[in-house]
Image: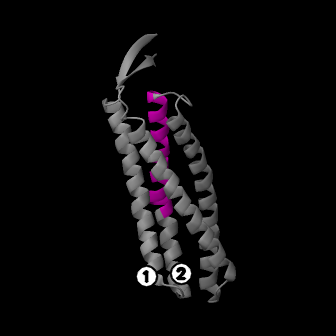
Amino acid sequence: MERQTLNKTSYLVKTFQLIAIIGFILCLGSISAFIVMNIVLGDSPSIDSIYWQRLFVSKITFVLIIPGIILIVLSAVILSWKLHGFFNNKWITIAQSLIILIIINSTNIIILADKVTAIAIHQQQIMTARPEYVILKSKEDMFGALNMIMLLGCLIITNYLTCNKKDTLLNINVA
């Protein structure tokens, strides 16, 4: 096995930092649109407004948010593994734990979002509001906010806290 020195400012590191930032932008931009939609719709939106909002949210979730989360998680795993190894540094351990929590929480959000969208579609078909919509929608919003905080934490840890230490060179095994 040959030993190679990986510089924390190398193209590999910079590329995966950029990928993580792009993923975060995809998530943040989409979620910002959801927040604006909630504000514009107000406290008592019509059933049709809820229906169209949920269709938009469902499509954007699968087109932008899930790919954004995948980019952040993959780049965080690769950066932490290439720069430090798994669970070798307290910040890396926190970032890797956040990755696991993000995956679990994202799965929960996707399941909740599907239920909320199904209820919105049903409400629109029967033209009657269902009380469980508001309960599930507030849970989805709460888990979404938690996910954004964890994603931001993961982004900060893997891109700034671990890459801006005084030691700039790490030894990496190359097969």
Q: Position of residue 104 (x, y in %)?
A: 62, 51
Amino acid type, residue under disc 2 in the picture: Ile
x 50%, y 56%: residue: 149
Q: Secondary structure at mark 1?
A: helix
Above or below: residue 138 compared with residue 50: above
Residues at marks 1 and 2, CA–CA distance in whole angstroms: 11 Å
Q: Position of residue 97 (x, y in %)?
A: 58, 42
Is disc 1 surrounded by few (<14), some (14 to 19) or many (20+) residues within 10 Å? few
Q: Position of residue 50 (x, y in %)?
A: 53, 81
Task: Identify residue for label 1.
Answer: 40
Sequence order check, earlier mark of 1 and 2: 1
* Front disc: 1 or 2: 1
Amino acid type, residue under disc 1 in the picture: Val
x 53%, y 62%: residue: 145
Question: Does 37 lie within the magenta span?
Answer: no
Above or below: residue 11 compared with residue 2: below
Residue lying furthest front in this view?
Answer: 166
The span picked out in magenta is: 61-83
Task: Identify residue for label 2.
Answer: 50
Above or below: residue 134 compared with residue 8: below
Q: Is residue 73 left or right of residue 11?
A: right
Q: Position of residue 27 (x, y in %)?
A: 44, 58
The image quadrant that residue 2 belongs to is top left
Q: Secondary structure at mark 2?
A: helix
Numbered badge on residue 174: none
Is disc 2 surrounded by few (<14), some (14 to 19) or many (20+) residues within 10 Å? many
Question: Does 63 lie within the magenta span?
Answer: yes
Q: Is residue 7 left or right of residue 110?
A: left
x 40%, y 56%: residue: 26
x 36%, y 35%: residue: 164
Q: Which SS does the magenta portion mostly show? A: helix
Q: Is residue 119 left or right of residue 89?
A: right
